[in-house]
């Protein structure tokens, strides 16, 4: 039976946190059982904002180890580094750029946002990011793309490129459909927005944090700003207490209800509530750390080589078809 194709990418830009696990990795593991899944580590993409070579190779290996520790099976999916098919993806990117108006790229909201945040590094790669993303998708010609909500605009660019390309050269590129990733936005321990790799490390629970670190970070987490003393009733709601909001992601319903009742009646203080949250967080992070500890660099590279070979085979077929459709002789 032929399974529906799915593709997803992640940039290798540093240590992952528990928000990444719930927002991406956990879902990818489940999807590899249902789809012909292609997962790539977007090291070429990372050059738009991280152009220095220091540590890039190590970050790719670490990202692969994270994928494997989360439960990805290189026999059940295709796990590869984007640079493994750089020749093919960059060639396709060039062809696709010929049918994408520059004005539309300049109006993409994510470009305007990044240009504002990185005014000294507004390069073509930043402008052409959605076109390179389209090349990643079309190279393996999958029907579905797993994306976060912030990437939906890029997928619309890819769909527009497919329509223009197909009008010129025939019905060759499928218009990709979105499979929106887990919408869980794990709150920052600081109470300011969601956990982010670019945030203060103290405000995130890293997937590499040991039990003591998890406890220390959780102890400093923002809780109920209106509860100054232990004897005062708390406000255990998602809006009233950041720690309780975190409990809604990691603590079972029955225990949450017990915590809420105890907090409202001042039978439990913020320190005790944070300890229970730390236990739930460690229950997720610690098994991940143990699995990752058993996966060495050699294991990660073996998985990436296996994925490279599978990805190159699919990429070669796509490039051959595109060249033929365009009319290139390639003598």
Image (tube, helix red, strand yellow):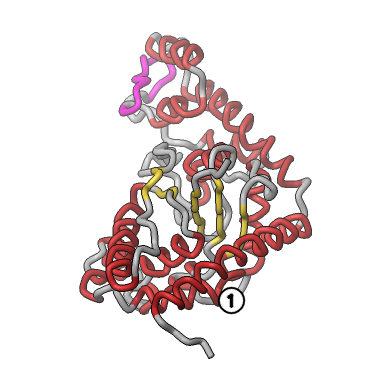
Judge by depth and name the residue closer to the eye, 286 or 329.
329
Q: Secondary structure at mark 1?
A: loop
Residue at (60, 62) in percent of width and height: 311
Magenta span: chief secondary structure = loop
| 326 lies above or below 65 | below
- Residues 236 and 19: in front is 19
Estimate the x, y position of residue 316 in percent, counting from the top left. Answer: 57, 70
- Residue 31 drawn in magenta: no
From this view, report whether residue 24 is shown above or below residue 11: above
Total numbered badges shown on the rendered structure: 1
Q: What residue is pinned by disc 1?
A: 53
On screen, residue 146 versus residue 301, left or right, reads: left
Query: Is residue 21 in view from this perspective?
Result: no
Residue 275 vs residue 301, the one in the foreground: 301
Q: Residue at x 36, y 49 (%)?
A: 177
Instruction: Specify whether 177 is left or right of 275.
Output: left
Asked where in the image residue 132 lies, by quadrant, the reply is: bottom left
Give the quadrant of the N terminus.
top right
Give the percent coordinates (x, y) of residue 327. 41, 82
Residue 246 x %, y %: 45, 30
- The residue sitting at 41% across, 49% down in the picture is 147
Q: Residue at x 49, y 49 (%)?
A: 6
Is-magenta flag for residue 233? yes
Residue 220, percent from left and from top:
50, 37
Establish if 291 lies above or below 176: above
Magenta stretch, residue numbers: 228-239
Side of 226 where 318 appears, left or right: right
């Amino acid at each position: 039976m032929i399974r529906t194709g799915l593709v997803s990418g992640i940039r290798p830009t540093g240590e992952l946190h528990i928000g990444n696990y719930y927002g991406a990795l956990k879902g990818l593991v489940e999807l590899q059982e249902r789809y012909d899944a292609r997962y790539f580590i977007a090291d070429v993409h990372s050059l738009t904002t991280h152009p220095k070579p220091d540590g890039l190779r190590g970050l790719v290996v670490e990202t692969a180890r994270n994928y494997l520790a989360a439960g990805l099976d290189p026999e059940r999916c295709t796990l590869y580094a984007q640079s493994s098919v750089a020749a093919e993806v960059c060639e396709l990117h060039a062809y696709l750029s010929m049918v994408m108006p520059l004005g539309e790229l300049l109006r993409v909201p994510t470009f305007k946002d990044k240009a504002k945040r990185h005014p000294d590094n507004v390069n073509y790669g930043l402008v052409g990011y959605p076109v390179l993303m389209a090349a990643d998708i079309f190279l393996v010609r999958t029907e579905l793309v797993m994306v976060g909500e912030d990437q939906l605009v890029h997928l619309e660019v890819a769909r527009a490129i497919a329509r223009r390309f197909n009008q010129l050269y025939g019905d060759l590129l499928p218009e990709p459909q979105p499979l929106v990733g887990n919408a869980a936005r794990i709150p920052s321990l600081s109470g300011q927005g969601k956990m982010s790799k670019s945030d203060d490390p103290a405000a995130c629970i890293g997937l590499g944090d040991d039990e003591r670190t998890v406890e220390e970070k959780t102890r400093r987490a923002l809780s109920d700003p209106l509860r100054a003393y232990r004897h005062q009733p708390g406000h255990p709601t998602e809006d009233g207490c950041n720690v309780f909001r975190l409990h809604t992601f990691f603590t079972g319903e029955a225990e949450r209800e017990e915590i809420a009742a105890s907090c409202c009646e001042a039978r439990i203080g913020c320190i005790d509530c944070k300890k229970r949250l730390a236990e739930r967080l460690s229950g997720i992070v610690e098994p991940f750390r143990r699995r990752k500890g058993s996966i060495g660099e050699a294991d990660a590279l073996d998985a990436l080589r296996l994925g490279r070979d599978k990805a190159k085979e699919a990429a070669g077929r796509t490039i051959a078809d595109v060249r033929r459709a365009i009319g290139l002789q390639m003598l």
